[in-house]
């Protein structure tokens, strides 16, 4: 146990050691519990325990998974051990709330009717609620009292709560139920003995169906003092007089012979002892009379009183808050104690009180108050009451005695002559603090630094902290949510050091710090919190908010007597963002520190630091603002704003805590776009009128300074100052209206125009996105401007369009200021109103009227017929009634009808007297307010005598020409009531009453009432009058209505009995006579059971279906009763059926599997019944304990038959089915149903593991296709189990003749089969021996082949490695020019490049239109806002595919190549957006730029493509070209299969030929194309080469200096073998000597023709070849040819070695092979000389051979690419350095400190996106041919290049890919090379924007004419057109785009392009450029 204590304490210490030393788990604590080195070590094992909480104030928490309700808490003041008393459990916890010990205290069998021990009554398991929990340090006791066994107590060992020290079963101390209060505390008793003082509320119980108290209650007094002497009489009364006297240290609830325990409850709240007195605080009624208000009282009696004669009650008042909720005794701080005229730390009584819900109720409400009572004043008032009693004034406590005081000379308080005094003078105090809507449940107090701090607990689980200023003033300075929604227990306990508070809620115990210092990061926050525990500790290293004891090396500032340092002002107070200045910061209360100060500017998430200097005097600090470049780069996201406010803080160098801080503003005048905005700020900006620009430096940026306007705070001198001097427009009218389609001339007022400067004016109108511009003239007065007449028109179908208006001047079209923007309202009358009535009701300001053509228009636009408006009193023709409701009325009338239609007058007087219904007048006057002109009339019908019907007619103004008649008929009817169902219902209401009858939907208001029929009253003169006078009318809410039925819900009735159903149809009243409705007493439920026989408790399973039998009375008056079971927070319901008035049957509900998660034991759930509005049964189980709980069991499991095939043979009378049934109530006969096939199996018995049923006598039919019927078990009617099949086992019968014959025949056949099998077996054995011999021979051959291959490979590696030649100077490097290089990179899959062509149109006259549109679109592309929105909108569309992104980015780069500065700006912005997006998500930032998923990621390699071409051509191209040539040379050293492309020498495992090939190298002499010269060229070939391979090698030798695109190709030539003058033989791949094997033909090789070394071969052009037709010879070196390009070859063709004839053969289905003959399965061929494959790994050494041969070439390439000095010397470092710096800045901006992230970004941007692409595709840079095998080898090189740029560790194993293992030892060297390359670039000086822009400008100038940018623009326009709607929406939503009219400009492009139908036809160029 000691070790475990050390472990726990060590763990807590380690967890909290980061906090100050005054925290909970200090070394002092550790020493108390044996803390040693072993504990420290073991503490590491406990780091996974969730004991120490990480919240700022909640240090740790304790819960019990068993969910025991916590009752009481005690803290041992000497060692901090915590004890918790809970329901059925007592815990011992260490100070950090780790469990040391716990003991079970319940539940135990108990009955209130008997004592502990034997009992004749049933003793159910009863929970034990902890009532008293006290620590007795003197005896090392823990006193525990519970609610069971009549409230007995026991003494437990303080060190081991499992050990009981003393127990007394015969002394009843505590209340014996859960809710009755019990208060106990330790004190001194008579004769200085230790006693337990207890106050106990009477515990009531349900005994024999009535509420009563236990028969043993007489042994439990209301208040008692019980001995704790270590004797057998422990817990007995401290003093008890001998009989017959009934006196002692106790007080009973009894006066004379009358008991008051049931009628006068007293609730005990708190108790304490002080000096020689004991005190108890209670809530009770003011007197014994029922109905008197509840009040709070305090009881006092002397400790030495042996008969409690000093027992005195006094009323305790706290203002208007009568009900005490909790109390505590504690000390006051010095300042507050002085105001109470008390000494410091003097104790007072604090209580929290609540208001009462009513004047006679003891139920508190959520309005609370805190009151403070001086103990001295309490005692003084008690003493005064005793003095008054001695003088004869006063009386005794009413529930103890009924005597009055009498005069006495005794002045003893502890032995008074008059006992049980009821004090008359209340003890009162004014509330110190009040709280609205707050329910206080706990209080504790402490004093610190002369302050008084009070902790208050609330019902919602919150702790509030108060600082009390005075007796009537306090403030809440902090709140901590401990356990939301759970009340705080009244026991609040401090730890021994008073640094923590233990707070207990219902199921959680929390340990809180008393202070929250660590949550405050600044001095102002710390002192501003006004936390008495906290102050600011100034130190050089780490200034912080802390308690005074923790500030050991600094100045501690307390909120009462000190102030924080503060900034008084900063000069200047704001600054232009492009300027850098030194600031002066004036600081008051600046602390003295030794280190230097710094200034920190917080800009977003960045902190920019500058050096600060403290000037003489100590109160001024000067520091400069950050460098403008850094500042502007940091403010990039906010550059669209006019100013940006940062936090300016002063700190000590090396300290992250602000000493002082304030806001400082950086502004940018150039961001203000209007003169008014430029003037209306305090930044001192100037408006340059001549340029329309706001600036902070007019001398530099303004052209004409005399016309400038200066702001009021500007230091510049000028005659124009302030916003009132701005040239501006003044709106001359409140609203400018013009109808669409009309012209209007506009006149606006102007001010401050400058005629000398402003020489010309124009007016601009933006009408629905279309800009209209007209000339404008300044009038002579220079106060107004006239705009020429303009047509205002729009096409959209909307009523009103606002047309913004502006006046611009000069060539630059600069707008005049418009402080209140002038808008022209353009409207369409036809859209504002479609009907005449609505038209005439329009506002007269629109001048709309009705045209005779049936439209609403202005008079100007009414082209034909008359025009009417509302002014001339026009009536609209053709009034129409479209509908009305209701459609019928009772004869009595007054039905409110709503008539709807059109043209129904334009004023109420037009229709008021002219509405008739069925020829009867309809009164409209009462509904004038409901009239809607022209469209709605409301009126009420008149009374009629008989049933009638007719039309509704409206005469507008009484004019018969304007009549509206309804198309439907309105009827007057007489509703009839015919019956009701049901005829009975509960008194609480809720019955769904259905009324049958006729015309029940008549009228506009139908109400149902149930009129009670009271009994006749004797003596009444008129029985009817008497009944009417006393009848009670109950409403019935209508929920459904049609002509034949009404359904309503009854309301609660005041009594039972019969009632008349009455229905009111408007004014018509109808009573249903002869069929009364009867209110009956609400149903009551006596019992529930799962069976009528055994009466077991109810329950169910998740599948439902169990029967629940409910007994009671009046059950059948409910139509649709339901059973309701509560699981979690949800109700689960099922239907019930009433069998009669006393019996109801319900099915248990179903529960979803997710909700019904059951453990080892079933769940006990609350349940009830839904029976209309009888809410008393809704939670029946919780209100009636006798009903028990609903037990939810797991579903029974039915096991399948265990027999083979699940087929069970049925032999006996019963079928036994195995089950797993934990459900104790699942034994109902019909709960389990068993079906055999289509017939039932009668269930006879059900047990926990078995179901027995009786199957049918005859085997039933089958439900399935199986041979036997299936057995299905249905559980609860829902869950089905198919457990197998049943086979009836019948008796043996004699076989018929046919069966015997069949058996004999089968036997004979079986014998024959056996003989045949034996013979066949013998034959197979012989064959198997032959096959085994062949296999052994085969394996021997394989073994020899493997040995030979391994030996050859080893010898080859050691002796024959042939290194390729590095000299390419003999034929040069075949570079593409810049144009072709760029196109191949940008458009890798295209043959004809669009950007080299032109745009052709069908009609040349339309070309100017297209050019104009493209020019407009180009201007938009050059607008950064537009282009960024364009790209972002496309990328956000899910249909913008990856291919679209690549194509779009390529065309965008082509379009922007002429402006690379702008292109670079766009690229950086998009990359910054991409990085920002990746940082906002939860993804890994390292994957950025790895995949091409955005336009920016595609643009980046294109950007490098444009800028790094010089580096490629001058440096990197040579080693890359050498590598490609070297790979080809190494491959040519060995055989290569012409069909599969596999070769002996390769870097790729996939392209490695895996057979042994016998071959030899020979040299042939090939005659050149100009054979007349007689010169031959030696060509090295292999004798295993095909004829096509020989031709290819010969051509490569002859034309090695010629670009591949212009070379001839092998299929253009025949190969002849020449010998002598006339000997010629044409060699072909396939001819008559070709080897044929079935469908397979092997291609001919040189050795098939017996060609020897030195043979003469000739290439002869074919007659049909293009080469032959264009061939001419000119001698040069070997032979030079002037060649024209041959047709291009498909890169996907089978092999370059296959001729045209071979290709045709292959296409016709012929099968050819060269070195390796493919097989249908991967098995070893029987012909080892041709296709004998070995294990593939045998040939891997060939990879190593190839790698060694190419090692130097790969290394040279890597060295050149990552050569920093080369980049620096050649000048190509500029773009690389620029882009890498950009990535570094982005990482810094996003506070990324991991260097691997930035390294990965750089690798993904340049090496992986640019270099890898070129390594894998050298044909982009060179005019060469890349075969499949070269491609696979380069892929291996590229993969290792990528691995070299990675930061991740390559952990390789034998199972790793071969390509990675091949370069495993080289990768670390290459990685080091990459890292050094990046490091050197970072060290290089930053590239200035000027240098970079100069390079970009030169790039644009040199290559501006390479491509047709118009074609690229056209391709971009196609995307703009495809996504036009999305792009326009994005532009319209962007404020900047709207301001610069970008949506309108894009629409203009669409409109211009629509004028010409463009057909883009690309100029077909030759594929060779």
Image (tube, rainbow, N blue to C red):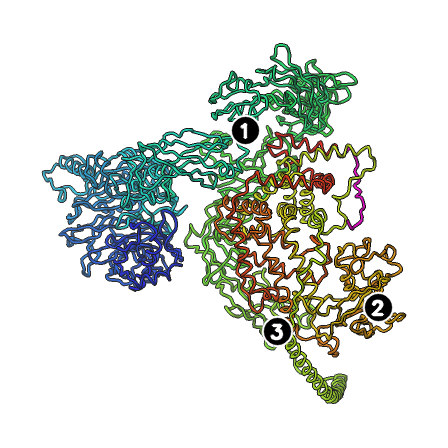
- Which of labels 1 and 3 is toward the front? 3
Position above or below: 654 against 1216 = above
Q: Is residue 1956 magenta?
A: yes
Report the residue marked by disc 2.
1628
Q: Main secondary structure of the magenta part?
A: loop
Q: Secondary structure at mark 3?
A: helix
Q: Secondary structure at mark 2?
A: loop
Q: Is residue 765 left or right of residue 184?
A: right
Q: Is residue 1044 magenta?
A: no
Q: CA distance from mark 2 to mark 3?
A: 38 Å
- Which of labels 2 and 3 is toward the front? 3
Position above or below: 1641 against 394 = below
Mark earlier in primary sequence (2, 3): 3
Report the residue marked by disc 1.
670
Residue 521 on image: x %, y %: 37, 42
Q: In this view, which residue lies farthest toward the left? A: 409
Residue 678 on image: x %, y %: 53, 24
Q: Which residues are magenta?
A: 1953-1969
Q: CA distance from mark 1 to mark 2?
A: 80 Å
Q: CA distance from mark 1 to mark 3?
A: 75 Å
Q: Secondary structure at mark 1?
A: helix
Residue 1105 on image: x %, y %: 55, 58
Task: Check disc 1: other Cα within 10 Å, few if <14, some if 14-19, many if 20+.
Answer: some
- Which of labels 1 and 2 is toward the front? 2
Report the residue marked by disc 3.
1358
């Amino acid at each position: 146990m000691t070790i475990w204590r050390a472990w726990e304490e060590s763990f807590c210490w380690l967890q909290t050691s980061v906090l100050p030393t005054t925290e909970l788990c200090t070394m002092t604590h550790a020493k108390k519990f044996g803390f040693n080195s072993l504990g420290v070590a073991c503490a590491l094992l406990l780091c996974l325990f969730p004991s120490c909480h990480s919240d700022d104030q909640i240090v740790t928490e304790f819960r019990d998974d068993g969910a025991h309700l916590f009752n009481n808490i005690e803290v041992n003041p000497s060692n901090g051990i915590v004890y918790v008393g809970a329901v059925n459990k007592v815990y011992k916890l260490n100070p950090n709330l780790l469990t040391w010990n716990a003991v079970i205290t319940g539940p135990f069998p108990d009955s209130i009717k008997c004592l502990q021990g034997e009992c004749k009554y049933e003793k159910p398991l009863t929970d034990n609620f902890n009532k008293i929990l006290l620590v007795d340090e003197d005896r090392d006791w823990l006193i525990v009292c519970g609610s069971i066994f009549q409230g007995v107590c026991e003494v437990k060992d303080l060190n081991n709560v499992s050990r009981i020290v003393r127990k007394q079963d015969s002394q009843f101390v505590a209340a014996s139920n859960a809710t009755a209060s019990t208060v106990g505390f330790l004190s001194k008793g008579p004769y200085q003995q230790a006693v337990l003082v207890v106050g106990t509320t009477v515990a009531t119980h349900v005994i024999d169906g009535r509420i009563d108290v236990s028969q043993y209650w007489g042994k439990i007094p209301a208040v008692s003092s019980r001995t704790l002497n270590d004797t057998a009489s422990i817990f007995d009364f401290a003093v008890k007089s001998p009989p017959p006297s009934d006196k002692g240290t106790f007080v009973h609830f009894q006066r004379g012979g009358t008991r008051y325990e049931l009628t006068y409850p007293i609730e005990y709240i708190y108790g304490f002892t002080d000096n020689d007195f004991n005190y108890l605080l209670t809530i009770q009624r003011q007197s014994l009379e029922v109905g008197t208000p509840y009040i709070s009282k305090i009881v006092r009696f002397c400790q030495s009183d042996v008969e409690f004669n000093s027992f005195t009650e006094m009323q305790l008042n706290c203002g208007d808050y009568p009900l005490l909720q909790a109390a505590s005794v504690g000390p006051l701080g010095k300042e507050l104690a002085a105001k109470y005229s008390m000494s410091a730390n003097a104790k007072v009584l604090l209580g929290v009180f609540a208001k009462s819900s009513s004047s006679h109720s003891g139920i508190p409400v959520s309005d609370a108050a805190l009151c403070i009572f001086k103990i001295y004043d309490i005692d003084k008032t008690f003493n005064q009451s005793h003095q008054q009693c001695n003088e004869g004034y006063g009386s005794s406590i009413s529930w103890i005695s009924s005597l009055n005081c009498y005069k006495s000379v005794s002045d003893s308080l502890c032995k008074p002559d008059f006992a049980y005094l009821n004090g008359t003078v209340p003890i009162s105090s004014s509330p110190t603090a009040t709280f609205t809507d707050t329910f206080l449940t706990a209080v504790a107090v402490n004093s610190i630094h002369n302050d008084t701090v009070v902790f208050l607990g609330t019902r919602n689980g919150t702790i509030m902290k108060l600082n009390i200023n005075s007796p009537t003033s306090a403030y809440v300075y902090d709140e901590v949510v401990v356990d939301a929604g759970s009340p705080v227990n009244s026991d609040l306990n401090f730890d021994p050091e008073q640094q923590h508070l233990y707070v207990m809620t219902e199921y959680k115990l929390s340990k809180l710090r008393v202070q929250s210092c660590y949550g405050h990061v600044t001095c102002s926050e710390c002192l501003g919190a006004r936390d008495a525990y906290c102050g600011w500790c100034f130190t050089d290293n780490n200034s912080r908010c802390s308690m005074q004891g923790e500030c050991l090396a600094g100045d501690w500032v307390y909120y009462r007597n000190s102030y924080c340092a503060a900034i008084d002002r900063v000069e200047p107070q704001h600054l232009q963002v492009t300027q850098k200045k030194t600031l002066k910061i004036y600081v008051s209360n600046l602390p003295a520190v030794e280190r230097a100060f710094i200034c920190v500017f917080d800009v977003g998430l960045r902190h920019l630091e500058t050096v600060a200097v403290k000037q003489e005097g100590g109160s001024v600090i000067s520091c400069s603002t950050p460098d403008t470049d850094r500042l502007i780069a940091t403010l990039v996201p906010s550059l669209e704003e006019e100013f940006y406010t940062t936090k300016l803080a002063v700190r000590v160098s090396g300290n992250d805590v602000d000493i002082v801080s304030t806001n400082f503003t950086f502004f940018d005048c150039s961001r203000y776009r209007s003169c008014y905005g430029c003037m209306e700020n305090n930044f001192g900006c100037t408006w340059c009128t001549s340029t329309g620009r706001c600036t902070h430096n007019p001398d530099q940026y303004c052209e004409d300074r005399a016309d400038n306007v200066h702001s009021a705070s500007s230091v510049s001198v000028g005659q124009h100052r302030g916003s009132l001097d701005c040239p501006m427009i003044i709106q001359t009218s409140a609203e400018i209206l013009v109808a669409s389609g009309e012209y209007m001339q506009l006149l606006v007022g102007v001010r401050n125009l400058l005629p000398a400067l402003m020489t010309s004016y124009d007016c601009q109108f933006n009408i629905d996105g279309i800009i209209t511009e007209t000339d404008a003239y300044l009038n002579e007065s220079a106060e107004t401007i006239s705009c020429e007449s303009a047509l205002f028109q729009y096409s959209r179908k909307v009523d009103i369009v606002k047309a913004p208006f502006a006046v611009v001047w000069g060539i630059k079209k600069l707008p005049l200021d418009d402080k209140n923007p002038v808008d022209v309202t353009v409207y369409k009358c036809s859209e504002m109103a479609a009907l005449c009535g609505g038209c005439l009701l329009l506002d007269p300001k629109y001048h709309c009227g009705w045209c005779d053509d049936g439209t609403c228009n202005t008079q100007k636009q009414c082209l034909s017929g008359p025009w009417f408006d509302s002014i001339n009193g026009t009536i609209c023709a053709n009034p129409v009634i479209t509908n009305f409701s209701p459609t019928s009325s009772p004869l009595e009338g007054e039905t409110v009808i709503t008539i709807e239609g059109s043209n129904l007058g334009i004023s109420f007087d037009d229709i008021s007297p002219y509405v008739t219904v069925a020829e009867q007048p309809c009164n409209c006057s009462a509904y004038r307010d409901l009239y809607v002109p022209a469209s709605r009339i409301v009126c009420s019908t008149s009374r009629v005598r008989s049933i009638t019907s007719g039309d509704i007619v409206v005469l507008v103004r009484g004019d018969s020409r304007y009549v509206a008649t309804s198309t439907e008929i309105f009827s007057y009817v007489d509703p009839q009531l015919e019956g009701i169902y049901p005829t009975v219902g509960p008194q609480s209401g809720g019955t769904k009453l259905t009324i049958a009858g006729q015309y029940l939907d008549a009228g506009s208001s139908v109400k149902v009432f149930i009129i009670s029929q009271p009994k006749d009253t004797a003596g009444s003169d008129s029985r009817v009058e008497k009944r009417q006078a006393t009848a009670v009318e109950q409403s019935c809410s209508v929920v459904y209505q049609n002509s034949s039925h009404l359904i309503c819900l009854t309301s609660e009735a005041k009594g039972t009995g019969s009632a008349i159903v009455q229905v009111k149809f408007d004014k018509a009243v109808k009573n249903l006579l002869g069929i009364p409705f009867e209110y009956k007493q609400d149903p009551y439920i006596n019992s529930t059971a799962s069976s009528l026989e055994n009466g077991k408790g109810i329950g169910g399973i998740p599948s439902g279906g169990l029967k629940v039998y409910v007994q009671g009375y009046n059950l059948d008056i409910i139509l649709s009763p339901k059973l309701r079971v509560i699981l979690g927070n949800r109700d689960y319901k099922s239907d019930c059926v009433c069998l009669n008035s006393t019996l109801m049957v319900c099915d248990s509900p179903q529960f979803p599997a997710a909700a019904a998660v059951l453990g080892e034991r079933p769940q006990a759930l609350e349940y009830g019944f839904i029976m209309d509005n009888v809410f008393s049964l809704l939670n029946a189980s919780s209100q009636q304990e006798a009903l028990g709980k609903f037990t939810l069991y797991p579903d029974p499991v039915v096991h399948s038959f265990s027999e083979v095939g699940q087929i069970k043979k049925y032999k006996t009378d019963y079928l036994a089915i195995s089950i797993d049934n934990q459900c104790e109530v699942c034994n109902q006969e019909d709960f389990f149903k068993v079906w055999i096939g289509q017939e039932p199996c009668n269930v006879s018995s059900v047990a926990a593991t078995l179901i027995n049923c009786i199957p049918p006598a005859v085997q039933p039919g089958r439900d399935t296709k199986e041979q036997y019927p299936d057995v299905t078990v249905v559980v609860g009617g829902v869950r089905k189990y198919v457990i197998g099949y049943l086979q009836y086992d019948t008796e043996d019968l004699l076989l018929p003749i046919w069966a015997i014959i069949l058996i004999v025949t089968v036997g004979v056949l079986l014998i024959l089969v056996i003989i045949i099998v034996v013979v066949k077996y013998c034959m197979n054995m012989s064959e198997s021996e032959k096959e085994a011999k062949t296999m052994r021979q085969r394996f021997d051959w394989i073994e020899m082949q493997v040995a030979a291959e391994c030996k050859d490979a080893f010898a080859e590696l050691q002796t024959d490695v042939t290194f390729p030649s590095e000299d390419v100077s003999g034929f040069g490097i075949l570079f593409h020019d810049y144009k072709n290089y760029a196109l191949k990179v940008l458009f890798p899959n295209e043959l004809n490049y669009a950007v080299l062509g032109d745009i052709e149109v069908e009609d040349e006259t339309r070309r100017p239109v297209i050019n104009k549109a493209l020019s407009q679109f180009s201007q938009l592309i050059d607008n950064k806002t537009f282009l960024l929105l364009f790209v972002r909108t496309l990328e956000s569309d899910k249909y913008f595919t990856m291919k679209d992104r690549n194509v779009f980015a390529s065309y965008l780069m082509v379009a922007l190549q002429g402006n690379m500065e702008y292109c670079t700006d766009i690229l950086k912005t998009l990359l910054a957006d991409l990085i920002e997006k990746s940082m906002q998500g939860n993804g890994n930032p390292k994957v950025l730029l790895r995949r091409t998923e955005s336009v920016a990621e595609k643009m980046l390699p294109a950007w490098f493509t444009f800028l790094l071409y010089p580096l490629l051509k001058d440096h990197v191209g040579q080693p890359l070209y050498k590598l490609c040539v070297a790979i080809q040379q190494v491959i040519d050293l060995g055989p290569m299969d012409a069909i599969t492309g596999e070769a002996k020498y390769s870097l790729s495992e996939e392209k490695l030929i895996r057979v042994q090939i016998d071959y030899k190298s020979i040299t042939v002499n090939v005659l050149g194309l100009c054979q007349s010269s007689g010169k031959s060229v030696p060509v090295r070939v292999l004798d295993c080469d095909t004829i096509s391979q020989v031709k290819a090698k010969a051509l490569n030798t002859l034309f090695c200096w010629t670009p591949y695109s212009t070379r001839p190709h092998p299929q253009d030539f025949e190969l002849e073998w020449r010998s002598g003058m006339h000997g010629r033989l044409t060699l072909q791949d396939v001819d008559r000597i070709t080897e044929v094997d079935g469908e397979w033909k092997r291609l001919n090789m040189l050795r098939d023709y017996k060609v020897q070394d030195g043979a003469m071969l000739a290439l002869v052009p074919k007659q049909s070849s293009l080469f032959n037709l264009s061939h001419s010879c000119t001698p040069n070196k070997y032979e030079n040819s002037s060649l024209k390009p041959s047709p291009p070859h498909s890169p996907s063709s089978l092999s370059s070695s296959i001729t045209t004839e071979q290709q045709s053969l292959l296409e016709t289905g012929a099968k050819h092979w060269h070195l390796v003959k493919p097989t249908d399965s991967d098995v070893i061929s029987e012909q080892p000389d041709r296709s004998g494959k070995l294990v593939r790994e045998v040939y891997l050494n060939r990879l190593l051979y190839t790698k060694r041969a190419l090692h130097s070439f790969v290394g040279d390439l890597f060295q050149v690419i990552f050569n920093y000095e080369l980049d620096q010397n050649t000048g190509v470092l500029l773009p690389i350095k620029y882009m890498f710096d950009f990535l570094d800045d982005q990482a810094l901006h996003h506070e990324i400190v991991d260097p691997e992230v930035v390294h990965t970004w750089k690798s993904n941007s340049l090496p992986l996106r640019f270099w890898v692409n070129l390594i894998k595709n050298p044909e982009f840079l060179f005019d060469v041919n890349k075969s499949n095998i070269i491609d696979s080898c380069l892929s291996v090189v590229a993969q290792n290049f990528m691995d070299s740029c990675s930061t991740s560790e390559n952990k390789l194993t034998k199972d790793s890919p071969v390509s990675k293992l091949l370069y495993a030892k080289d990768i670390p060297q290459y990685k080091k090379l990459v890292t050094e390359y990046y490091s050197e670039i970072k060290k290089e000086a930053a590239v200035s924007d000027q240098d970079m822009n100069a390079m970009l400008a030169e790039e644009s100038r040199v290559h501006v004419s390479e491509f047709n940018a118009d074609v690229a623009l056209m391709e971009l326009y196609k995307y703009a057109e495809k996504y036009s709607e999305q792009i326009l929406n994005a532009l319209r939503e962007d404020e900047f785009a709207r301001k610069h009219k970008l949506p309108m400009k894009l629409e203009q492009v669409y409109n211009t392009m629509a004028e010409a139908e463009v057909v883009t036809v690309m100029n077909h160029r030759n594929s060779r450029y």
